[in-house]
Image: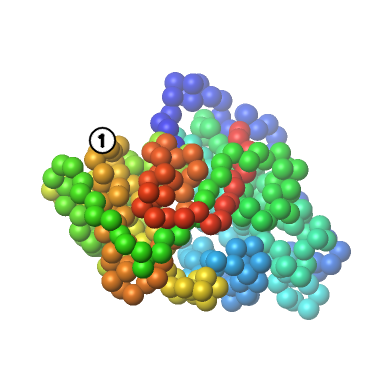
């Protein structure tokens, strides 16, 4: 995301721009007996709901139970105000709603809506009520911040999630960006890449945690929809159960990280994918080191490490309009496009 400008400094506070914002009204649906905030005691039921939705909406990847549990423990979430679950008369969880404010407040404010309705309960109007509540709660949260910053509310959907896309459009969201999932067969030849300069490519390790976060924030500053990652949010990622330091790679100039390719492994995904894989979460090069073939250097180093670890494929997602031309680079390295997703945005 680009830096704030003089126009941003003159922008009125959010409370003034949004006007009077009423408290969100709980969803109402005759077949849903109860709506209430979710708690950490709901993790098992939420995991069951998410898995049922994942199998229909994006069967090639799943939402880990650990990720759901984490949403109740990090400091930047407020489940009591920003989540709901819908229960039927028997107490079964049939829907969930979540509103997440990104913890960064440097130049922009972003809010993400993430609602789910069990596949057996879709087509009854429950999703419409879920998104309405989420959107109302997002506006309330923005007004409470009262910052003089540009703000945006995001809804992400897979290409096949036509219902979710329709709901977002009806609430005034516009499709702003498409993302492509790309897969690389690790049994195919992996090219040699030599970066210019004196950077050294090596495995990521814990001692490089902060240097890599700094590099990530610099590399993604001009990327669409990206905000700086604060230390706590970074900690949950790099110290989480899925990042594989042995597969991940960084490029170092002395003690400075100038490029990185960080990969995770979630073996639950392998069942529906039909193959073992590493997911490349982040690839980036600091802005003052672009054009030196550092990105392909760290990528191919990760690919070799994953192949040598016995994994069959590598997977990543890329912005189809990346300012660095990343999608073209990945294609040249043997990645093939498979699925697409879209970001719907409403700006304030």
The reply, left or right, for residue 126 in relation to residue 244 is right
Image color mode: rainbow
Q: Secondary structure at mark 1?
A: helix
The reply, left or right, for residue 307 in relation to residue 54 is left
> Quick check: can you spot residue 270?
yes
> Quick check: can you spot residue 105?
no
- Identify which residue is drawn at 42% across, 55% down: 335
The reply, left or right, for residue 229 in relation to residue 54 is left
Q: Is residue 32 above or below residue 199?
A: below
- Identify which residue is drawn at 36% across, 52% down: 333
- Identify which residue is drawn at 20% across, 55% down: 201
Q: Which residue is mark 1?
A: 288
Q: Is residue 314 above or below residue 326?
A: below
282 or 256: nearer the eye? 282
* Residue count near mark 1 (Cα–Cα under 10 Å), binned few <14, some 14–19, many ≥20: few
* Name of the residue lying farthest toward the front: 189
35 or 120: nearer the eye? 120
The reply, left or right, for residue 160 in relation to residue 150 is right
- Identify which residue is drawn at 59% across, 76% down: 44
To which quarter of the image does residue 92 belong? bottom right
Q: Quadrant of the C terminus?
A: top right
Horizontal and vertical percent for residue 321?
Answer: 49, 39
- Count of marks overlaid on the render: 1
Horizontal and vertical percent for residue 288?
Answer: 26, 35
Horizontal and vertical percent for residue 121?
Answer: 78, 67
Q: Quadrant of the N terminus?
A: top left
* Name of the residue lying farthest toward the bottom: 90
Horizontal and vertical percent for residue 303?
Answer: 32, 62
């Amino acid at each position: 995301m680009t830096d704030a400008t003089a126009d941003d400094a003159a922008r009125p506070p959010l409370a003034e721009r949004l006007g009077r914002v009423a408290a969100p009204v709980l969803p109402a649906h005759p077949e849903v007996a109860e709506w209430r905030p979710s708690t950490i005691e709901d993790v098992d039921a939420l995991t069951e709901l998410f898995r049922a939705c994942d199998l229909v909406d994006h069967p090639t990847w799943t939402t880990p139970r650990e990720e759901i549990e984490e949403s109740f423990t990090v400091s930047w979430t407020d489940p009591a105000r920003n989540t709901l679950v819908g229960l039927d008369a028997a107490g079964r969880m049939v829907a969930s709603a979540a509103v997440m404010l990104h913890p960064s407040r440097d130049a922009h404010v972003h809010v993400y809506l993430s609602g789910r309705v069990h596949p057996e309960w879709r087509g009854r109007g429950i999703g419409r009520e879920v998104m309405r509540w989420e959107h109302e709660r997002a506006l309330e949260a923005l007004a409470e911040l009262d910052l003089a910053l540009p703000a945006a509310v995001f809804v992400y959907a897979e290409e096949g999630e036509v219902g979710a896309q329709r709901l977002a459009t009806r609430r005034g969201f516009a499709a702003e960006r498409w993302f492509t999932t790309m897969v690389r067969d690790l049994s195919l030849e992996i090219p040699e890449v030599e970066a210019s300069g004196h950077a050294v490519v090596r495995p990521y390790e814990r001692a490089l945690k902060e240097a890599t976060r700094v590099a990530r924030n610099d590399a993604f500053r001009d990327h669409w929809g990206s905000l700086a990652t604060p230390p706590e949010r970074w900690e949950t990622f790099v110290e989480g159960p899925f990042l594989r330091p042995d597969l991940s790679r960084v490029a170092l100039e002395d003690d400075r990280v100038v490029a990185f390719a960080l990969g995770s492994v979630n073996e639950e995904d392998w069942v529906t994918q039909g193959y073992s894989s590493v997911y490349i979460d982040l690839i980036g090069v600091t802005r003052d080191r672009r054009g030196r073939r550092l990105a392909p250097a760290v990528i191919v180093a990760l690919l070799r490490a994953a192949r040598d670890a016995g994994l069959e494929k590598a997977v990543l997602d890329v912005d189809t309009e990346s300012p660095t031309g990343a999608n073209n680079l990945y294609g040249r390295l043997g990645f093939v496009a498979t699925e697409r997703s879209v970001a719907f945005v409403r700006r304030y």
